[in-house]
C-alpha cells in the first residue's frame, strides 16, 4: 500500500492553512456524483476517464507538491484505487536507486557514503519501497466527500458549489 488514509481534520487543516497546488493537492475522482459541491481547488479527475496517460500527466502536474489527497464519495473504492494507481505511477517515475557495488572495497569512506545513502533513502512506511517516494505523500480522505460535506458544508473555505437539494437526504 503506497498511500495512507487521512482523517477529515488533517485534510481540513491542509486546505485552511495551505495553498492548493503548492502545499497540497486534492484530487476528486467522483464521476456523475460530483454534483452538489466540492473541496475548493480540487482537481477533477473522474475515475471513468482515467487512462495511463492521464495518470502520467497528473504525476507531472503535481510534481513538487508534498501532499496529494484523493477522494470520491465514500473513499471506499474509487478514491483508494486512484491513490494506489497514482502512487505506483509516481514510484515508476522516480529514477532507480543504484544497487550497491559489491565488488568495491569497503573503506571507511564507502561505509560513510553507504550510511548516507541509507539515511537519504529511508522510508518511514514499511510498505513503500525505499528511495521511491519522491518526497510526496499520497493520502485518501477517510469517509470521502459525503462525510466531508456533512461536517463542513457551511464553511466556504472547505466546501464550494454546495447544493443543499442534492444533499438533503444526507444531513448531519
Image (cartoon, rainbow, N blue to C red):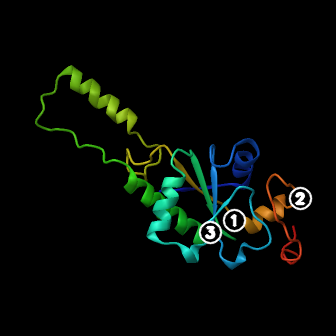
Q: Which of 18 and 73 lies nearest the eye of the viewer? A: 18
- The Cα–Cα distance between marks 3 and 2, rounded to whole angstroms, is 22 Å
Q: Which of 125 and 28 lies nearest the eye of the viewer? A: 28
Q: Mark 1 or mark 2, which is nearer to you? A: 2
- Please name the residue shown 54% across and 52% down the image: 62
Task: Check disc 2 and report the residue beneath it.
Answer: 154
Residue 122 position by quadrant: top left
- Please name the residue shown 51% across and 47% down the image: 136
Q: Confirm or deny contact between disc 1 and disc 3 (CB under 8 A).
A: no
Using the image, tell me which numbered label, if any, was put on residue 61.
none
- The Cα–Cα distance between marks 1 and 3, rounded to whole angstroms, is 14 Å
- Is residue 66 placed above or below 88 in the rendered structure? above
Left or right of 54 in this view: 10 = right
Rendering coords of residue 44 (x, y %): 64, 65
- Tell which circle, 1 or 3, labels the residue nearer the N-terminal end: 3
- Tell which circle, 1 or 2, labels the residue nearer the N-terminal end: 1
Task: Check disc 3 and report the residue beneath it.
Answer: 29
Rendering coords of residue 37 (x, y %): 79, 67
Q: Which quadrant is home to the C terminus?
A: bottom right
- Rate crowding at label 1 as few (under 14), some (14 to 19) or many (20 or more) other CA atoms within 10 Å: some
Q: Is residue 146 visible?
A: yes
- Rate crowding at label 3 as few (under 14), some (14 to 19) or many (20 or more) other CA atoms within 10 Å: many
Amino acid at each position: 500500500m503506497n498511500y495512507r488514509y487521512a482523517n477529515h481534520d488533517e485534510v481540513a487543516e491542509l486546505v485552511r492553512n495551505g495553498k492548493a497546488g503548492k502545499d497540497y493537492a486534492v484530487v476528486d475522482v467522483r464521476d456523475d456524483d460530483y454534483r452538489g459541491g466540492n473541496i475548493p481547488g480540487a482537481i477533477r479527475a473522474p475515475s471513468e476517464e482515467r487512462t495511463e496517460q492521464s495518470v502520467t500527466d497528473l504525476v507531472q502536474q503535481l510534481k513538487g507538491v508534498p501532499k496529494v489527497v484523493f477522494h470520491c464519495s465514500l473513499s471506499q473504492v474509487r478514491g483508494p484505487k486512484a491513490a494506489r494507481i497514482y502512487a505506483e505511477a509516481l514510484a515508476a517515475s522516480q529514477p532507480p536507486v543504484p544497487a550497491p557495488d559489491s565488488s568495491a572495497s569497503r573503506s571507511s569512506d564507502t561505509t560513510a557514503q553507504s550510511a548516507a545513502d541509507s539515511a537519504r533513502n529511508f522510508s518511514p512506511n514499511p510498505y513503500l519501497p525505499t528511495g521511491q517516494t519522491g518526497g510526496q505523500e499520497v493520502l485518501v480522505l477517510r469517509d470521502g466527500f459525503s462525510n466531508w460535506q456533512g461536517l463542513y458544508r457551511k464553511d466556504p473555505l472547505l466546501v464550494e458549489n454546495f447544493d443543499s437539494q442534492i444533499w438533503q437526504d444526507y444531513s448531519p
